[in-house]
């Protein structure tokens, strides 16, 4: 099937509308960038100064001087990478079990997992908070990571992907004397790399940008993730170092995620194609 | 390897996920239902109150307003977002370089976190220090108090959200467009169909499932809108932008009325569940319709 | 007793029986073909031997060792799959070494075994390629190579040629025949292609309806089918089988067809079942076209297939029964012609009411 791409030229009026739209998309970003390049004192009472030089990297230098922003960056990295690794491991194991092995209650357990797709996080978040309080896990990396591991989507996604791999491969490996785990690890898992990378990108993006859970779980500022740290900064920005510094923090916090996006664009687009097919 | 092991060892693979899933998702879900039937606060372990929490919710004007606000903002966001995303997908479904760049531009905001988005928009919307304020002043107008006027605050949050959420629906529509077989367009061209007819008779019907998916996903997402209102306005002025999830947050973590907050969470859960089930039902019907073609 | 022994193998899937007490003995180094229509249980039996299915009942014994209780990798068997089942992410070398690694064979030994097998199969230049970069025929050889390196006592081939195009299939058939001369192991090949079974196998096991119908060398399957199923299933075009009536005769049976034509067979009369209702089976090559009234019976031509060196004539007897005959390549028979048919009674077979086959005495 040939993919349908329009080949005619865009009418000028439409073209203009798209460009205006693009300007609206970009303007706030540029505004933020300009603000971040101004000294804080210059911006006091006059944000319009952002449109004229002089510009300075002083705010960015200040970020590296501020132990809290770099600490939040580290926390975000640990939590997002930990969540991503955890999701890949759990979803791959469970996907292999559901897709390729037969065991009692397999169907009912899979349906139980699918039901989770319909449970919005706010329906459980209060009681997750209590549970983690009971377990004494708030303000800790496990406390920030664990709730990110139970999304049923990863399991569903890996199960679907692994189902499509021919059963003969497992059988050939069994005759080659491979154990269940060897079959999983050496034969099936290497074939799921495309699915793994797609799942990894989405998990990472979701975890990096998560706000609700770290907001209520990380109450000590040294355990904030960047998302929560920035929320705290903007809530009391009046008392803090000023507008330019705040915006520099915003830009700084978006750099990693933009890098991930640019590197993994393909996976994102492919996953969308999969969702539209479903 | 005996046969019994062979039957059960599959469970070993799903067990790590399932145990966490039961502990961190299913248990809190059930506990939430149980708590919603109790009066629980920071000090007491709670006593059974039946449906009293729900009755109190029904009579609580603050909760009522938060629900109305949530529905209103969802209504402002979803149709506009869907139409813009579809229009962009149609305009940018081209193999040219400029189309690729523009797709990147329109998607870029989607990777930002809610705190960065609100940080950016706070200083776009603020009358004294914002981009729009500067613009308005440049035209010689009085800057609009977007975040402090009760009738402007919900549209302001909606605009922020639309700016933020455009990317994924656009990608979904683009993917949907690419799956329309080229020969359908060729057949339409042979039938001398005009551009408009082709769009209405070929493109739109083929995008029906994608459209349902976009609308329902966005509806479910926007009914849970939280960060924008919490960070930009803290629900103000005087509750004009308090959303249901913000109500939940304030009740649970501000006033520590856990039973009452649980009841609110269950209500919201049921509303979103209804949306999700409608989506399954509609896509199921759309699929049947396509199979029947 | 060395070799493979299957004792009373039973298997049912969700209440549907697919194997009803199968017994079979395979000699060491013997090439056996499992032949039968799909759903006859032949693949299931192969998979039971491999350990990919568990029999509900019965024993699988290889070289005096019971193997049906062992995991597939410990049974001393290797399998070539229908779709090859090469590991797509491994090179040919890694594919072939995988089983040896799992068996903890020392590295040096693995390298030696792999390069030996690669030499035999002439796939040395492919060793560092991945399956996706190879043709169907090359993948087939690698799949065989992966089986050979394990030095199994029994090779199991599941429809090994069915994914190859016609030309490649013939060549690979020849290669398989050569291969079995080199390996010191038995071979069981599942196939639904009778030409494959006839040319390769020492003995053919014909399956139908959950049971083994006959176990015999190819020519015996062809010339002395155990029952009417085997007679119809083996041979192309199929044997003509018509209802007939026993009608006296001397030591050998004489039968009368539905249109009163008489055929004197060489099937001994004693040994035939009681009653006079039988069926007569005739291969096309023992029914020749001749002039009208000159043969055993007359018939109307329905279809003529010219194959070059000979022609097949599909005809109908006066009572409507269909019969297949043979004629010269230069036959003048045309559709609608009335012709005579000369039935060679010496080559005819008889089948009792239960389908059992009766044949002329072995020479």
Image (spheres, coloured by chain):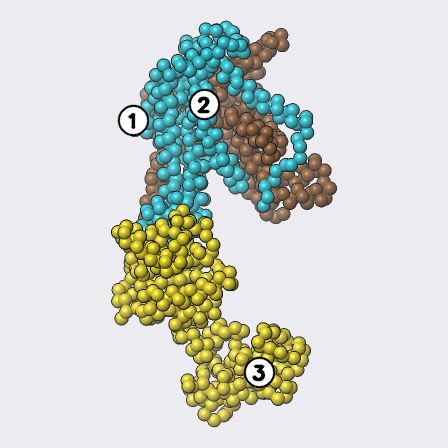
Chain colours: A cyan, B brown, C yellow
Name the foreground residue: B126 vs C292. C292
User: Disc 1 sits on a residue from what chain?
Assistant: A
Q: From the viewer's perspective, is residue B213 above or below residue A234?
A: below
Q: Is residue A176 visible?
A: no
Q: From the viewer's perspective, is residue C337 above or below residue A137?
A: below
- Which label sits in the foreground, 1 or 3? 3
Query: SS for tag 2?
Result: helix
Tag 1 residue: A136
Name the foreground residue: A63 vs C19. A63
Quadrant into which the N terminus of chain A falls: top right
User: Where residue B199 sits in the image (x, y, percent)?
Assistant: 67, 37
Name the foreground residue: A238 vs B35. A238
- Do badges 1 and 3 share one subunit? no
Tag 3 residue: C288
Classify residue C261 by image quadrant: bottom right
Query: SS for tag 3?
Result: strand
CA distance separating discs 1 and 3: 94 Å
């Amino acid at each position: 099937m040939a993919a349908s791409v329009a080949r005619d030229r865009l009418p000028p009026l439409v073209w203009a509308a798209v460009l205006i739209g693009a300007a609206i998309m970009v303007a706030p970003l540029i505004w933020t960038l300009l603000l971040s390049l101004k000294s804080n004192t210059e911006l006091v009472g006059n944000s319009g100064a952002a449109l004229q030089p002089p510009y300075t990297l002083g705010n960015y230098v200040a970020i590296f001087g501020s132990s809290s922003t770099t600490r939040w960056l580290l926390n975000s990295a640990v939590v997002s990478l930990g969540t991503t690794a955890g999701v890949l491991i759990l979803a791959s194991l469970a996907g292999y079990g559901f897709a390729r092995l037969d065991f009692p209650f397999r169907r009912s357990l899979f349906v139980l997992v699918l039901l989770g797709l319909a449970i919005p996080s706010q329906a459980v978040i209060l009681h997750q908070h209590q549970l983690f309080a009971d377990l004494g896990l708030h303000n800790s990396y496990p406390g920030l990571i664990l709730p990110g591991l139970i999304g049923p989507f990863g399991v569903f996604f890996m199960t679907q992907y692994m189902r499509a791999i021919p059963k003969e491969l497992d059988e050939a490996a069994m005759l080659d004397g491979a154990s269940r785990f060897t079959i999983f690890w050496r034969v099936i898992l290497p074939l799921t790399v495309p699915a793994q990378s797609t799942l990894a990108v989405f998990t990472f993006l979701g975890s990096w940008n998560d706000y609700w859970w770290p907001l209520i779980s990380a109450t000590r500022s040294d355990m904030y993730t960047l998302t929560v740290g920035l929320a705290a900064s903007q809530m009391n920005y009046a008392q803090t170092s000023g507008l330019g510094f705040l915006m520099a923090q915003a830009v700084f916090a978006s750099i990693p995620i933009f890098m991930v996006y640019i590197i993994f664009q393909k996976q994102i687009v492919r996953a969308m194609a999969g969702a539209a097919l479903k | 390897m005996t046969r019994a092991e062979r039957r059960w060892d599959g469970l070993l693979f799903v067990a790590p996920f399932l145990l966490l899933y039961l502990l961190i998702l299913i248990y809190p879900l059930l506990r939430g239902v149980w708590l919603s039937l109790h009066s629980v606060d920071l000090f007491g372990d709670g006593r059974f109150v039946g449906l009293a929490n729900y009755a109190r919710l029904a009579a609580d004007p603050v909760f009522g307003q938060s629900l109305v606000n949530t529905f209103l903002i969802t209504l402002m966001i979803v149709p506009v977002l869907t139409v813009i995303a579809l229009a962009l997908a149609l305009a940018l479904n081209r193999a040219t370089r400029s189309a690729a760049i523009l797709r990147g531009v329109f998607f870029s905001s989607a990777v930002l976190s809610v705190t960065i988005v609100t940080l950016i928009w706070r200083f776009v919307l603020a009358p004294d220090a914002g981009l729009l304020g500067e613009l308005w002043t440049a035209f010689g107008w009085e800057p609009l108090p977007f975040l402090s006027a009760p009738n402007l605050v919900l549209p302001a949050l909606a605009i922020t959200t639309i700016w933020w959420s455009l990317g994924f629906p656009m990608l979904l529509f683009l993917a949907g467009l690419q799956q329309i077989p080229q020969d359908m367009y060729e057949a339409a061209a042979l039938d001398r169909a005009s551009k408009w007819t082709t769009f209405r008779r070929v493109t739109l019907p083929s995008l029906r499932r994608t459209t349902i998916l976009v609308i329902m996903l966005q509806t479910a997402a926007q009914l849970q809108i939280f960060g924008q209102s919490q960070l930009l306005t803290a629900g103000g002025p005087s509750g004009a932008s308090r959303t249901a999830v913000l109500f939940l947050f304030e009740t649970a973590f501000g006033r520590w009325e856990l039973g009452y907050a649980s009841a609110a969470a269950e209500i919201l859960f049921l509303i979103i569940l209804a949306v999700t089930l409608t989506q399954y039902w509609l896509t199921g019907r759309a699929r049947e319709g396509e199979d029947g073609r | 007793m060395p070799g493979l022994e299957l004792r009373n193998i039973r298997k049912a899937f969700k209440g549907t029986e697919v194997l009803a007490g199968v017994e079979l003995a395979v000699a060491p180094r013997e090439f056996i073909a499992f032949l039968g229509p799909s759903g006859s249980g032949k693949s299931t039996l192969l998979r039971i031997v491999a350990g990919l299915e568990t029999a509900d009942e019965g024993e699988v014994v290889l070289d005096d060792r019971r193997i049906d209780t062992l995991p597939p990798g410990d049974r001393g068997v290797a399998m070539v799959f229908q779709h090859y089942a090469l590991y797509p992410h491994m090179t040919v070398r890694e594919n072939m070494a995988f089983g040896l690694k799992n068996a903890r064979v020392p590295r040096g030994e693995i390298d030696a075994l792999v390069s030996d097998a690669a030499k035999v199969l002439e796939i040395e230049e492919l060793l560092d390629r991945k399956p996706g970069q190879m043709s169907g025929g090359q993948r087939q050889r690698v799949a065989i190579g992966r089986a050979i390196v394990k030095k199994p006592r029994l090779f199991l081939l599941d429809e090994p040629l069915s994914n190859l195009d016609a030309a490649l299939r013939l060549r690979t058939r020849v290669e398989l025949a050569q291969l079995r001369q080199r390996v010191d192991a038995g071979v069981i090949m599942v196939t639904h292609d009778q030409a494959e079974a006839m040319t390769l196998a020492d003995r053919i096991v014909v399956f139908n309806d959950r049971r083994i119908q006959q176990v015999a060398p190819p020519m015996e399957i062809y010339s002395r089918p155990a029952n009417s199923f085997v007679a119809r299933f083996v041979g192309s075009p199929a044997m003509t089988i018509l209802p007939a009536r026993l009608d006296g005769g001397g030591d050998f049976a004489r039968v009368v067809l539905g249109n009163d034509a008489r055929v004197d067979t060489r099937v001994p009369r004693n040994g035939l079942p009681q009653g006079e209702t039988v069926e007569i089976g005739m291969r096309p090559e023992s029914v020749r076209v001749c002039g009208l009234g000159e043969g055993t019976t007359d018939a109307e031509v329905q279809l003529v297939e010219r194959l070059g060196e000979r022609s097949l004539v599909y005809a109908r007897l006066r009572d409507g029964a269909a019969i297949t005959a043979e004629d010269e390549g230069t036959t003048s028979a045309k559709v609608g012609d009335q012709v005579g048919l000369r039935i060679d009674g010496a080559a005819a077979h008889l089948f009792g009411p239960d389908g059992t086959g009766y044949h002329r005495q072995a020479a």
